[in-house]
Image (cartoon, helix red, strand yellow):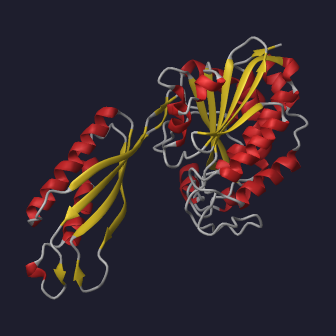
C-alpha cells in the first residue's frame, strides 16, 4: 500500500511546469558564478521563493538565501541547494553553455537550485495537504567549504528557526533515473594541505651553489604517494592527491621555493590525523636530506567533515522514494570519497538525509565504453568535468525527490 506521503507527492508534482523549470535551469547554467559571488543566482532563487509565498531573505553569510513557509503545527524541515559554480572552462557544446569564460556549473549546482525552486512552489501550492514549516536554503560557496558555516555564523537558525531535520541531494553520474541512498556514512572528509619547500636560489648554470627546491618537491610528491599505500591499512579508505605544484619563473633560474597543494580524503579522524602526521614527517625528511636552509611550512587549510546520514531519517526518505519511483531505483552503493559541507548545517545534532540523483543522459551512458556498470561509470563525464551535462529529463524527478522527502517528514493530512 502506498503511503500518504508518496500519494500526496505524486499529486503535488503531477502538473509541474516542466518547460518553465527547464528554462530556469538553462538560464542558471548560462550564467555560472563562483563561490561567494552568486549574486545573480541568489536573486533568481529568492524571486522564485518569494513568488511561491515564502518569506525570503538574501545576503545571509554573504550571498545565501533563506525562504520560510510556516504552515501550522508540525516539524520544521530544511531543504538545501548549493549555488556556486567552478573555475572550469565548459566543453559540453550545449546551446545553453556557460557565457562566462572559464567558469562552469560543472557540479550540478544549477540543477540543485532548479530542484529546490520547483519543490518550494509545489509544496506551497499544496499547503492544504501538510502542516509544519519549510525552510528553503540556497547556500553559497559549497565548493570552497565556506558557505554552510558562513550562513550558520550569520544567524541562520536564530533568524529563521532551528530545523528538526535537514534534506539535501546531489546530481551524480550514472544512468538517469536512480536515487542512491546510504543509511550512515555517505561521503568522506576532505582536508587541504599546503606545503612550502624552501631552497636557495641561483643561476641554472651553477646548481652546486644552490639548494634546488624543485628537485626536493619532486621527491616529495613521489614519496607522498606511499602514505596511503604503505601507512594506511587496506581495510581503510583514503586518498591523497597532489593537485598543484608551482615553482620558478624562467628556464635558467633555480627558484628559492616551491609550493605543493595536497588534498586528503578520509573516512575517520584517526586516519586523517595519521596522514597529516605522515605528510609533516615526509616533508621534513626530504627537506633535511636535500639540505634545505629552512624546514618546510606545512599548513592545514579548508576541511570538510564526513557526511553521515541519520539512519532513521534516511530510511524514511529512501522508502518514500522507492514508492514514488519504484523500489529498484533506490539502492545503497556504499560511501563515496567525495565531500560536502552540508553536515555543517546539522550543528552536530540535527538529523539529516542526503542522497544522490543520477543524471547521465541515456545515449551517453549507452555509448560509454565498457560492458558493466563500473566500466561505464568510470567513462562518463563526472562532476567537475568540463563535459558534465546532466540530462534535462531529471528536472522533474529531482523536484519530486525533494517534495516526497519533505512530505515523509512533515505532518501529512
Looking at the picture, how far across and down is residue 146, in whole percent? 50, 43
Describe residue 310's horizontal placement relative to residue 291 as left or right.
right
Q: Residue at x 22, y 58 (%)?
A: 223
Residue 403 appears in the rendering: yes
Q: Residue at x 72, y 25 (%)?
A: 134
Q: Dividing the picture into quarters, in which one does residue 2 lie? A: top right
Q: Residue at x 81, y 27 (%)?
A: 9
Q: Quadrant of the N terminus?
A: top right
Describe residue 300's horizontal placement relative to residue 54 as left or right.
left
Q: Dividing the picture into quarters, in which one does residue 313 lie? A: top right
Looking at the picture, how far across and down is residue 136, in whole percent? 70, 32
Residue reaching furthest to the right: 15
Looking at the picture, how far across and down is residue 56, in whole percent? 74, 34
Residue 374's place in the image compared with 135, above or below, is below
Q: Residue at x 54, y 41 (%)?
A: 147
Residue 176 appears in the rendering: no
Q: Quadrant of the C terminus?
A: top right
Amino acid at each position: 500500500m502506498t503511503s500518504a506521503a508518496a500519494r500526496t507527492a505524486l499529486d503535488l508534482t503531477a502538473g509541474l511546469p516542466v518547460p518553465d523549470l527547464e528554462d530556469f535551469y538553462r538560464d542558471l547554467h548560462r550564467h555560472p558564478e563562483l563561490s561567494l559571488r552568486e549574486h545573480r543566482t541568489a536573486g533568481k532563487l529568492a524571486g522564485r521563493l518569494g513568488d511561491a509565498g515564502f518569506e525570503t531573505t538574501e545576503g545571509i553569510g554573504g550571498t545565501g538565501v533563506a525562504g520560510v513557509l510556516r504552515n501550522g503545527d508540525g516539524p520544521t524541515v530544511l531543504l538545501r541547494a548549493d549555488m556556486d559554480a567552478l573555475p572550469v572552462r565548459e566543453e559540453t557544446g550545449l546551446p545553453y553553455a556557460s557565457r562566462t569564460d572559464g567558469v562552469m556549473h560543472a557540479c550540478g549546482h544549477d540543477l540543485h537550485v532548479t530542484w529546490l525552486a520547483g519543490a518550494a512552489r509545489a509544496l506551497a501550492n499544496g499547503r492544504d495537504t501538510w502542516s509544519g514549516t519549510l525552510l528553503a536554503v540556497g547556500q553559497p560557496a559549497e565548493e570552497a567549504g565556506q558557505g554552510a558555516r558562513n550562513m550558520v555564523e550569520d544567524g541562520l537558525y536564530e533568524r529563521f528557526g532551528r530545523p528538526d531535520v535537514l534534506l539535501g541531494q546531489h546530481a551524480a553520474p550514472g544512468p538517469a533515473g536512480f536515487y542512491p541512498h546510504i543509511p550512515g556514512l555517505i561521503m568522506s572528509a576532505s582536508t587541504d594541505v599546503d606545503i612550502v619547500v624552501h631552497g636557495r636560489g641561483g643561476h641554472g648554470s651553477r646548481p652546486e651553489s644552490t639548494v634546488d627546491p624543485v628537485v626536493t618537491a619532486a621527491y616529495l610528491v613521489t614519496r607522498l604517494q606511499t602514505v596511503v599505500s604503505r601507512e594506511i591499512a587496506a581495510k581503510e579508505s583514503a586518498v591523497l592527491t597532489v593537485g598543484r605544484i608551482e615553482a620558478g619563473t624562467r628556464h635558467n633560474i633555480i627558484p628559492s621555493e616551491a609550493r605543493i597543494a595536497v588534498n586528503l580524503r578520509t573516512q575517520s579522524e584517526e586516519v586523517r590525523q595519521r596522514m597529516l602526521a605522515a605528510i609533516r614527517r615526509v616533508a621534513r625528511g626530504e627537506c633535511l636530506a636535500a639540505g634545505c636552509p629552512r624546514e618546510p611550512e606545512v599548513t592545514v587549510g579548508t576541511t570538510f567533515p564526513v557526511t553521515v546520514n541519520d539512519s532513521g531519517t534516511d530510511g524514511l526518505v529512501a522508502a518514500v522514494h522507492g514508492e514514488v519511483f519504484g523500489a529498484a531505483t533506490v539502492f545503497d552503493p556504499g560511501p563515496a570519497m567525495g565531500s560536502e559541507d552540508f553536515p555543517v548545517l546539522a550543528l552536530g545534532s540535527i538529523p539529516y538525509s542526503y542522497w544522490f540523483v543520477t543524471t547521465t543522459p541515456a545515449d551517453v551512458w549507452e555509448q560509454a565504453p565498457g560492458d558493466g556498470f563500473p566500466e561505464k561509470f568510470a567513462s562518463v563525464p563526472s562532476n567537475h568535468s568540463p563535459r558534465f551535462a546532466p540530462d534535462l529529463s531529471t528536472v522533474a524527478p529531482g523536484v519530486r525527490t525533494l517534495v516526497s522527502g519533505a512530505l515523509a517528514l512533515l505532518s501529512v493530512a
